[in-house]
Amino acid sequence: MIIDILTLFPNMFVSPFAESIVARARSRHLVEINTVDIRDYALDKHQQVDDYPYGGGAGMVMKVDVLSRAIASVTSPDSRLIYLSPQGKKLDQAQLGRLARESHLILLCGHYEGIDERIIDLVDEELSIGDYVLSGGEIAAMVVVDAVTRLIPGVLGDDASSQEESFGDGLLEYPHYTRPRSYQGLEVPEILLSGHHEQIRLWRKRLSLVRTLLKRPELLLEREFDQEERSLLEEILFNREKTS
Ligand code: 4FV
């Protein structure tokens, strides 16, 4: 996959992508990440990239002509142009799964009050990482790059792990434990030391359902349940003692 990031602050992306999973994916050429400085497409001697809003009001707006040239410089037949903005669809694991199947993503990072609205016609989709206002789209773009890259086949040790994690199946993840077995009187649940893989799987599924029910019940509303999950939920909801 190729990811081109259109930004006024390309240096913001150096260190986040120089560590861990994304850096390893780049070194293994599973993903190519390029930053493009939008200011390089401001052709006037002051390299102006923003201007006062027509109709007045606070803040500055990024210029349509500069952005169009920057977008055209990276657009390809199979590229998908994504504008990160609070007006976008809320990003979630399902959206990321879809994006991870693309071959060429272009991430447009806004700044100031935002971009000239005439650019929106060029945009394939707007995505938001949350209902709050950032100083720029850069950090949102980093979220997308990190979360998409780890879904690219071969990036994570075993691709299975990305299925098992939170939201992989629409539920919150079960609790994890590792050595030491006992810590200041806090023990690891016996079941996990039993070697009974089927019982461990069931225990983990039950805990995922319980945690989702307690912490993010709304996630259960938009989810289909298989028979096993139905009987576990029955058990959880109607005979309380089996939840621990
Ligand atoms: C944002 C978000 C976000 C808005 C004005 C950049 C800022 C400035 N992007 N999810 N929330 N963008 O706040 O994606 O131009």
Image (spheres, helix red, strand yellow):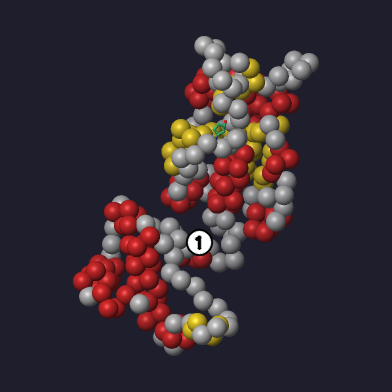
Which residue, as the protein is rendered here, is positioned at the far top?
A: 55
Place residue 232 in its image quadrant: bottom left
Q: Residue at the spot x=43%, y=58% of the render? A: 167
Place residue 236 in its image quadrant: bottom left
Image: 136 above or below 20: above
Quadrant containing the C terminus is bottom left
Asked whether residue 106 is in view, the answer is no
Q: Nearer the viewer, residue 164 or 140?
A: 140
The reply, left or right, for residue 110 in relation to residue 213 is: right
Q: Residue at the spot x=46%, y=40% of the render? A: 131
Q: Position of residue 173 (x, y in %)?
A: 44, 65
Which residue, as the protein is rendered here, is positioned at the far bottom?
A: 194
Amino acid found under the numbered disc labelled 1: Ser
Q: Position of residue 27 (x, y in %)?
A: 72, 55
Quarter of the displayed picture in which ligand 1 can be seen = top right
* Tally of numbered discs: 1
Place residue 40 in its image quadrant: top right
The reply, left or right, for residue 122 in relation to residue 35 is: left
Q: Residue at the spot x=74%, y=20% of the render? A: 47
Image: 60 above or below 139: above
Mark 1 within 8 Å of ligand 1, using the beta carbon: no
Q: Secondary structure at mark 1?
A: helix
Residue labelled with disc 1: 162
Q: Residues within 10 Å of mark 1 (few under 14, many from 20)?
A: some
Asked whether residue 90 is in view, the answer is yes
Q: Residue at the spot x=54%, y=17% of the render? A: 57
The reply, left or right, for residue 149 in relation to residue 120 is: right
Q: Position of residue 13 (x, y in %)?
A: 69, 44
Image: 211 above or below 188: above
Q: Nearer the viewer, residue 12 or 34?
A: 12
